Each structure stands twice: as C-alpha cells, then as structure tokens.
Amino acid sequence: QQQVKQSPQSLIVQKGGISIINCAYENTAFDYFPWYQQFPGKGPALLIAIRPDVSEKKEGRFTISFNKSAKQFSLHIMDSQPGDSATYFCADDRGSTLGRLYFGRGTQLTVWP
Amino acid sequence: DTGVSQNPRHKITKRGQNVTFRCDPISEHNRLYWYRQTLGQGPEFLTYFQNEAQLEKSRLLSDRFSAERPKGSFSTLEIQRTEQGDSAMYLCASRSGQGSNQPQHFGDGTRLSIL
C-alpha cells in the first residue's frame, strides 16, 4: 500500500528556475520526513529532512516546507541547476518504532541548461 | 570511503538459480535494512535487522527469500529458485541506533537480472 503520495511524476525546469515537489502522507505516527536524491545506477542519498515540529527547513538551495494539518510536505529547489537532474523521493520515517522507510514513487527532475 | 558497501553490483542469472547478495553497513551502525526497487518506483521495504536479530519482514519477502546478519555486522540476502519477477535493484541501508532522527544511509545496490 502506498502510504506517501508524491507528485508530480516528472518535472522539467529551466536552469535558474524553482523546482517544487509535493508529498502527502497518511499516517500520524512518524518521526521525521527525509528527502532522498537518486542518480542513475546509484543508491538514494539523503538530501534534507524535517521533523514534524518544524514548519520549514532550509539547507542551501533546498527547502522543505511542512504542513502538519494538511499532512503535506514539499521540497523546493531554488536556482535549479543541470546537476540537480535526478530522481527525488520523499519518505515517511517511523524511526525507532518500526524502522522502515515508506517511500513515494519518485519525481524525475530534468533541468535544462 | 566508509559508506554502505554492496556486492556484487550486478548479477545476471538464469531463472531457477539461487543468488546471494552481501551488504557491509557503515561500521557501528546496528540497524540494517533491505529494500527492493523496480524501475520507476520508490524502494520497497523487505526486512530489518537490529544487530543480529531480524525484527521485521515485509510480505514481499516470500519463502524463497532469506536474510541473515550472523554477527551483527554484514548481512546477506539470498533468493532461491529465482523468477523473472525478482529482477530489480536490491538496496541495503544502515542507521545508527544512537539518538533520534538518525537517517538511513543507502548503498549503491545490486542490480539483479533474471534471464
């Protein structure tokens, strides 16, 4: 069952533009929400993560916004670069209780130079 | 590099054969996870170890699949009597058990192709 719904499935952005990826979760038991970046032939790499008691977290060009009441969180990539072209996954991390990550289906981002 | 290491990176085998993958987690990470990823999908959880104890198994892990972590360090995932549907990327991740909100770190996976 899909416990994290991610959209859009694919995204094309011009260099310098803003990339926005959205996720919605179903369960209320959680520890935090990480975003992973995956390049072809590689495993997912942690990009940025947010705890549910924080509404926004920024690291460089990457920002997560969290809306607890709507059960949604989003990733914003400012000044998108061709090197950002990758697949991005949001996840629901139950942490120490259940251990597993529930991933969204991914967003394939292409940034045109 | 002290990240999660997986071997082999690629495995091609005929249907019906057995295969075994190995994962070496980040040292001192006591939690280890196996996931499976098919094309165009996010990773799906298979199983989870805390030290040498296998604490959780997904329904995806049929009786043809077995995972071990005998000394609480490296882990192996074996698939017996492989089927076409087993073709996928098998990912291993590890996490420190110290403190809260510790992220899972992934290896680069083993890509399995069944002929």
Image (cartoon, coloured by chain):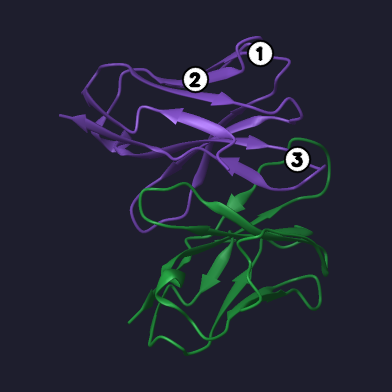
Chain colours: A purple, B green
Can you identify the residue that label 3 sits on?
A95
Can you identify the residue that label 1 sits on?
A68
Which is more N-terminal, label 2 or label 1?
Answer: 1
On screen, residue B53 versus residue A75, left or right, reads right
Amino acid at circle 3: Gly
Nearer to me, B40 or B10: B40
Q: Chain of mark 3?
A: A
Amino acid at circle 1: Lys
Q: Quadrant of the N terminus of chain B?
A: bottom right
Can you identify the residue that label 2 sits on?
A74
Q: Quadrant of the C terminus of chain B?
A: bottom left
On screen, residue B2 versus residue A6, left or right, reads right
Percent of width and height locating residue A81? 27, 28
Residue lying at 36% horizontally and 48% vertically, measured from the top left: B40
Percent of width and height locating residue B69? 75, 74
Amino acid at circle 2: Ser
Whether A84 is drawn above or below A58: the answer is below
Contact (CB < 8 A) between labels 1 and 2?
no
Whether A18 is drawn above or below B95: the answer is above
Q: Nearer the viewer, mark 3 or mark 1?
A: 1
